[in-house]
Image: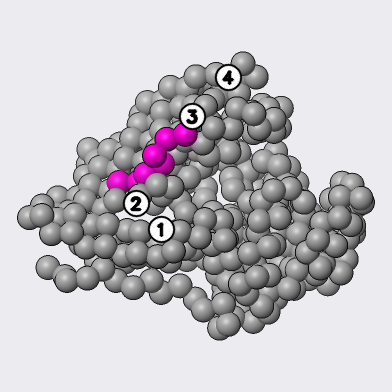
């Protein structure tokens, strides 16, 4: 038995080239992303686009971005190496396609799109163009998740038998998040994380049961999805925008259990508890969304290495998660 957990192998921001980034969208996640990327890396955000010139100029001034545009067509005409798509869920497909058609590598906010067909179309276009494309599921680029990745690869937990993961944040007062006409609801805003986690650990598991409750807006406010693979291994996922929950992730194996203290999808500790009572831990600062910069570093690393997909979030894995989302929606009778 090992005496310590592996150290994360995340890339040093100074070890990758400084790419020129364009950003489509000026909302909360775009602000968080640009703030942490410029503070922690040498990546350069040189252009931003919004439907409002006033908003684009305000965002550009706030972040020291030289070019602001109220036209996404103008934005993708800029001299950039990669475009970060940070618009609403229902706009991801059209804006990522616009960037790809213009010949740009793309990082697309999660979920890449809410449907299998639209996601597959983007993947096919990126592959046809030979361009880098990645879903911005930032958790998988974090040091914490690389420790888990190595633990799973080494078989330290024994045979994986079960995954339990929950994610709950009170978002009732967040208009867009609860607006079904904007793709709001628990599935798109939060559900990607638990379903990604279950799929990451049990890649062959499928949704066998799902139930959701609707908010007054008509959006699914919370849901439970149960997954199982052909070997009988199971995952229990719960997502809510109606209440705060511990938001922990647990992987149960025959030899040990791995626990990600909440919020499981952000930077934080990893704990492995063995059946004989031994406990091993990895700790790291809980820097919350400051850790978003790691995904930008991963994009720069891949592009500089000539890769069109990231090994930490390959396109087939993105597609697999969207398939689980569709399976759950079908069982809940919830259109995307």
Distance from disc 4 to disc 3, alpha carbons, whole Å, reads: 12 Å
Q: For the residue labelled by badge 4, is the local secondary structure a helix, a strand or a loop? A: loop
**N-term-proximal mark, 4 vs 2:** 4
Q: Name the residue under label 3.
A: 243
Front: mark 2 or 3? 3
Front: mark 1 or 4? 1
Residue drawn at x 56%, y 56% as measured from the top left: 289
Q: For the residue labelled by badge 3, is the local secondary structure a helix, a strand or a loop? A: loop
Q: For the residue labelled by badge 2, is the local secondary structure a helix, a strand or a loop? A: strand
Distance from disc 1 to disc 4, alpha carbons, whole Å, reads: 31 Å
Camera-nearest residue between 40 and 305:
40
**N-term-proximal mark, 1 vs 2:** 2
Q: Mark 4 points at which residue?
A: 215
Which segment is the magenta one?
244-250
Q: Name the residue under label 1.
A: 268
Residue drawn at x 31%, y 40% as measured from the top left: 164
Q: Name the residue under label 2.
A: 260
């Amino acid at each position: 038995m090992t005496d310590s957990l592996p150290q994360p192998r995340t890339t040093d921001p100074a070890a990758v080239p400084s790419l020129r980034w364009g950003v489509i969208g000026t909302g909360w996640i775009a602000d968080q992303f640009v703030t942490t990327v410029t503070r922690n890396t040498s990546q350069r955000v040189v252009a931003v686009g919004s439907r409002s010139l006033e908003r684009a100029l305000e965002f550009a001034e706030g972040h020291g971005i030289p070019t602001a545009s109220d036209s996404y067509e103008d934005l993708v005409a800029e001299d950039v190496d990669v475009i970060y798509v940070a618009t609403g869920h229902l706009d991801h497909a059209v804006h990522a396609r616009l960037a790809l058609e213009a010949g740009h590598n793309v990082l697309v906010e999660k979920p890449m799109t809410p449907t299998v067909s639209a996601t597959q179309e983007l993947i096919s276009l990126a592959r046809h163009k030979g361009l880098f494309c990645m879903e911005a599921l930032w958790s998988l680029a974090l040091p914490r998740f690389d420790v888990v990745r190595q633990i799973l690869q080494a078989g330290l937990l024994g045979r994986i038998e079960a995954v339990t993961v929950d994610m709950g944040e009170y978002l009732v007062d967040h208009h867009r998040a609860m607006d079904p006409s904007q793709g709001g609801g628990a599935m798109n805003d939060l559900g990607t994380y638990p379903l990604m986690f279950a799929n990451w650990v049990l890649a062959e598991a499928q949704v066998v049961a799902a139930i959701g409750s609707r908010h007054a807006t008509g959006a699914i406010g919370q849901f439970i999805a149960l997954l199982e693979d052909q070997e009988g291994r199971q995952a229990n996922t719960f997502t809510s925008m109606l209440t705060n929950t511990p938001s922990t992730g647990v992987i149960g194996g025959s030899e040990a259990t791995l626990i990600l203290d909440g919020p499981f999808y952000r930077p934080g500790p990893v704990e492995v508890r063995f059946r004989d009572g031994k406990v091993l831990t990895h700790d790291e600062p809980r820097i919350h969304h400051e850790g978003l910069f790691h995904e930008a570093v991963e994009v720069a690393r891949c592009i500089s290495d000539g890769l069109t997909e990231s090994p930490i979030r390959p396109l087939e894995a993105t597609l697999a998660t969207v398939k689980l989302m569709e399976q759950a929606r079908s069982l809940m009778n919830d259109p995307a």
